[in-house]
Image (spheres, rainbow, N blue to C red):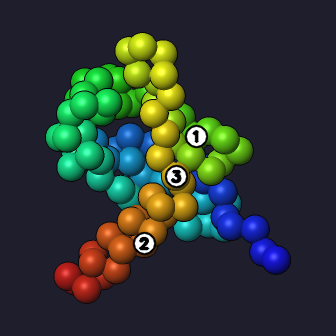
């Protein structure tokens, strides 16, 4: 069985966007604007400086932020990859 590629870096590239790099060489972009707009547990991420505190966590299987209460807010790296791949296809189709 082949292991899924692991997330190796997450770099903020603009308002609520990240460039994600994976262990197999894939690089893609995801936008968290819709998620952050939901407020609730994501409200702290509206602050651009807080959004930039993103970390790669859980051995490359998650993106992680720490909220104001010190709780981990994480997102599955595999799900974010699927979103990044879909964004890449949309971008190529638009060209």
The answer to the question of whether label 2 and label 1 lie on touching residues, with beta carbons closer than 8 A, is no
Q: Which mark is residue 56?
A: 1
Q: Farthest residue in the front direction?
A: 40
Residue drawn at 20 percent across, 82 percent down: 94
For the N terminus, which image quadrant?
bottom right
Q: Position of residue 55 (x, y in %)?
A: 53, 34
49 is higher (above) or lower (below) than 84: above
37, 17: nearer the viewer? 37
Residue drawn at 17 percent across, 40 percent down: 37
Spatial separation of the CA atoms under disc 2 and disc 1: 19 Å
Query: How many other residues sit within 10 Å of disc 2, few (<14), some (14-19) or many (≥20)?
Result: some
For the C terminus, which image quadrant?
bottom left
Q: Secondary structure at mark 3?
A: strand
The answer to the question of whether label 1 and label 3 lie on touching residues, with beta carbons closer than 8 A, is no
- Residue 12 visible in the picture: yes
Q: Earlier in the sequence, mark 1 or mark 3?
A: 1
Query: How many other residues sit within 10 Å of disc 1, few (<14), some (14-19) or many (≥20)?
Result: many
79 is higher (above) or lower (below) than 85: above
Q: Secondary structure at mark 2?
A: helix
Q: Earlier in the sequence, mark 3 or mark 2?
A: 3
Spatial separation of the CA atoms under disc 1 and disc 3: 10 Å
Q: Which residue is mark 3?
A: 76
77 is higher (above) or lower (below) than 94: above
Q: Which residue is mark 2?
A: 85
Q: Earlier in the sequence, mark 2 or mark 1?
A: 1
């Amino acid at each position: 069985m082949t292991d899924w590629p692991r997330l190796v870096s997450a770099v903020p590239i603009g308002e609520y966007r990240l460039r994600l790099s994976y262990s197999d060489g894939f690089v893609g972009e995801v936008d968290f604007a819709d998620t952050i707009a939901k407020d609730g547990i994501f409200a702290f991420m509206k602050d651009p400086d807080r959004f930039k505190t993103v970390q790669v966590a859980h051995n490359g299987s998650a993106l992680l932020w720490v909220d104001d209460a010190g709780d981990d807010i994480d997102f599955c790296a595999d799900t974010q990859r699927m979103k990044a791949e879909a964004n890449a296809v949309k971008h190529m189709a638009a060209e």
